Image: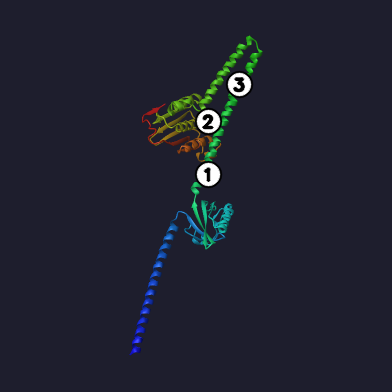
């Protein structure tokens, strides 16, 4: 009887242990499943983060071989990317820079940076940051994060080109002034020197005619100096503003060239910012000079319209015209470039529409600060 009771107690204890073991197994399984769910959730979040990241993320080995990428670039399949090296996707001139950055990161574990451009098939600029992937203290790989900076680089290049052209235009203007001084003022001064020397050697009877000629040359030189000063910057632009200056310029232009100008304006009787008035005057001046030089016409049209946010300048002629699609490449296009640069410098734009034998239309649109310069709605015609 005692043996039976003992056996029952042992069986009960064994059953309890089995139950406890099963409970532990079930608990461990539940914990494993929970951990697996959490792992899958974290992995999903990581993949979503990586795939939706604005930057390209790659894992590469010491040879630059691509082991993982968060997204494929347009035009590439996974087989064309995974297993290939970064060198396959870089312009050759950047291979050495990348190699040095990669070696430095593997050797030191420090993050390195380099800028590079893609091959001819995808010539985009990227800023690349290489960070070490470590196992313990050993660098086992590199994560490369690439940010598209193509628009920034193109803007940077455009600014450099813009600055270069501004310098070119300034040098051309200096050269023009130097020619004016040498060819006109210099020659007149030489003539005066000769006349004064002649007067010093002459008699009172001959000096009267010599001095009259000298007076005539002095008057002529004063006129040329005044004209040169007006060409550089008429004082009325600062004193009276753009409308009186344009009206004056049109009358003076017609007197010199014989070309009649139909001037229309709306909203420009009040003052604008100094840089805006200067740009308007220079654009009008250059466009009308080009008409006199190249168009071969007796009439032209000029229209100035200012609204709350923009000021539009339109200069038209029905003359010889040219291929406006290639004007940047033309030598005579440097003056046109100067007009365009003035518009761009103020955040505006300038377009030129022209075809051989069909005339030319120059249109410049300049921004006007809202509320600062309110135009006049009355219409004027000169």
- Height in image: 136 above or below 261? below
Observer-side mark, 2 or 1, equals 1
**Circle 2 — which element?**
helix
| Residue 46: quarter of image | bottom left
Q: Nearer the viewer, residue 126 or 323?
A: 126
Say whether disc 3 or disc 2 marks the residue closer to the N-terminus. 3
Name the residue at the top extreme.
205
Say whether disc 3 or disc 1 marks the residue closer to the N-terminus. 1
Q: Which residue is mark 3?
A: 189
**Circle 3 — which element?**
helix
Q: Nearer the viewer, residue 75 or 160?
A: 160
The picture places residue 318, in percent across and down from the top left corner, at 47, 33
- Classed neighbour count for the residue bearing mark 1: other residues with Cα under 10 Å, few (<14), some (14–19), many (≥20): few
Q: Which residue is mark 1?
A: 157
* Residue 264 in view in this figure: yes
The picture places residue 376, in percent across and down from the top left corner, at 37, 30
The picture places residue 116, in percent across and down from the top left corner, at 54, 51
Name the residue at the front extreme.
2
Say whether disc 2 or disc 1 marks the residue closer to the N-terminus. 1
Left or right relative to 72: residue 179:
right
Name the residue at the bottom extreme.
1
* Pointer 2 with pointer 1, Cβ within 8 A: no
Q: Residue at x 61, y 14 (%)?
A: 210
Name the residue at the right extreme.
201
Q: If the image is split into quadrants, where does the N terminus sit?
A: bottom left
| Residue 199: quarter of image | top right
The dot on residue 293 is: 2
């Amino acid at each position: 009887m005692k043996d039976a009771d003992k056996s029952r107690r042992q069986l009960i204890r064994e059953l309890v242990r089995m139950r406890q073991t099963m409970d532990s197994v079930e608990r461990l399984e539940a914990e494993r499943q929970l951990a697996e769910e959490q792992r899958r959730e974290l992995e999903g979040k990581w993949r979503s983060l990586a795939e939706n990241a604005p930057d390209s993320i790659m894992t590469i080995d010491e040879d630059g071989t691509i082991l993982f990428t968060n997204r494929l670039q347009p035009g590439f399949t996974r087989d064309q990317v995974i297993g290939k090296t970064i060198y396959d996707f870089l312009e050759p001139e950047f291979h050495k820079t990348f190699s040095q950055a990669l070696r430095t990161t593997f050797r030191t574990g420090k993050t390195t940076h380099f800028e590079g451009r893609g091959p001819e098939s995808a010539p985009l600029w990227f800023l690349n940051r290489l960070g070490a992937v470590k196992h313990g203290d050993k660098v086992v790989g590199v994560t490369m994060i690439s940010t598209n900076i193509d628009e920034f680089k193109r803007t940077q290049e455009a600014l450099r080109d813009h600055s270069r052209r501004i310098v070119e235009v300034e040098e051309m203007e200096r050269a023009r002034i130097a020619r004016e001084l040498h060819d006109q003022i210099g020659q007149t001064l030489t003539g005066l020197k000769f006349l004064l020397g002649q007067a010093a050697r002459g008699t009172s009877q001959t000096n009267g005619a010599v001095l009259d000629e000298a007076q005539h040359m002095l008057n002529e030189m004063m006129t040329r100096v005044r004209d040169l000063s007006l060409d550089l910057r008429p004082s009325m632009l600062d004193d009276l503003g753009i409308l009186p200056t344009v009206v004056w310029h049109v009358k003076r232009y017609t007197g010199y060239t014989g070309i009649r100008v139909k001037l229309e304006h709306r909203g420009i009787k009040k003052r604008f910012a100094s840089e805006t008035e200067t740009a308007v005057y220079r654009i009008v001046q250059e466009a009308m000079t080009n008409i006199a030089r190249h168009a071969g016409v007796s009439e032209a049209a000029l229209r100035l319209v200012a609204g709350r946010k923009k000021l539009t300048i339109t200069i038209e002629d029905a003359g010889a015209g040219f291929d406006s699609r290639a004007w940047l490449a033309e030598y005579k296009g440097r003056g046109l470039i100067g007009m365009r640069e003035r518009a761009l410098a103020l955040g505006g734009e300038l377009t030129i529409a022209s075809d051989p034998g069909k005339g030319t239309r120059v249109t410049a649109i300049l921004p006007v600060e809202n509320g600062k310069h309110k135009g006049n709605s009355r219409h004027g015609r000169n």
